[in-house]
Image (cartoon, rainbow, N blue to C red):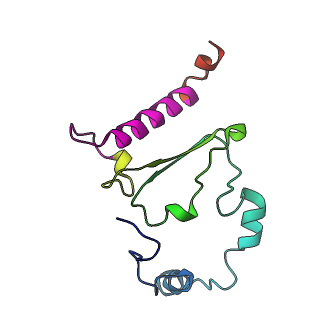
Amino acid sequence: MASRLHQERSEFVDEQYYADQCNQIFGLDMSVYPDIAATEAAFGGGNKINSTNIFFANGKEDPWKWVTQLENRPEINQVSMVSECDTCGHCCDLHTPEPNDPEELNNTRQQIYNFLDLILNPTQLLQ
């Protein structure tokens, strides 16, 4: 079970770790790239992404759910949902459904289906 007190990731896997990895793999100087302030100004930062038609699906045991958007923003058609089941981790909503899947997970899958159905069939909104 995920816990803020007992983290699933090493304390050494931080922003600098990934910057060093980009440097080693791609030769990128991450001290100047990307321009985080410019990116956040253009697209929104942290948990306030300024794009429309997004469904944020998280599992109870996602170690990074704390840094994603956890609030619905209906004014720009963003939905956020956390599957609150003990076996629900990253991408569990994308796995092939099984008969013994938790009800919370099935509910998330149905909400994603409904969300996509409305986006792909916008005439339903007029009915």
In-image side of 50 versus 108 (left or right): right
In the image, farthest residue toward the top: 127
Say if 2 sits above or below 56 in the image: below
Residue found at x 36% / y 43%: 105
x and y, in percent, of residue 7 in the image: 42, 76
- Where does the magenta region start and end? 95-119
The tally of labels here is 0
Image-quadrant location for residue 43: bottom right
Residue sitting at x 30%, y 43%: 102
Asked whether 101 falls inside the magenta stretch, the response is yes
Q: 72 or 22: nearer the eye? A: 72
Q: Residue furthest left?
A: 99
The main secondary structure of the magenta stretch is: helix
**Which residue appears at 67% of the width and 74% of the height?**
34
Please identify the quarter of the rendering in which residue 127 is found.
Answer: top right
Residue beneath the point at 70% across and 40% down: 76
Pinpoint residue 27: horizontal percent, then vertical percent. Answer: 54, 85
Q: Is residue 123 magenta?
A: no
Residue 66's place in the image compared with 54, above or below, is below
Quadrant assignment for the N terminus: bottom left
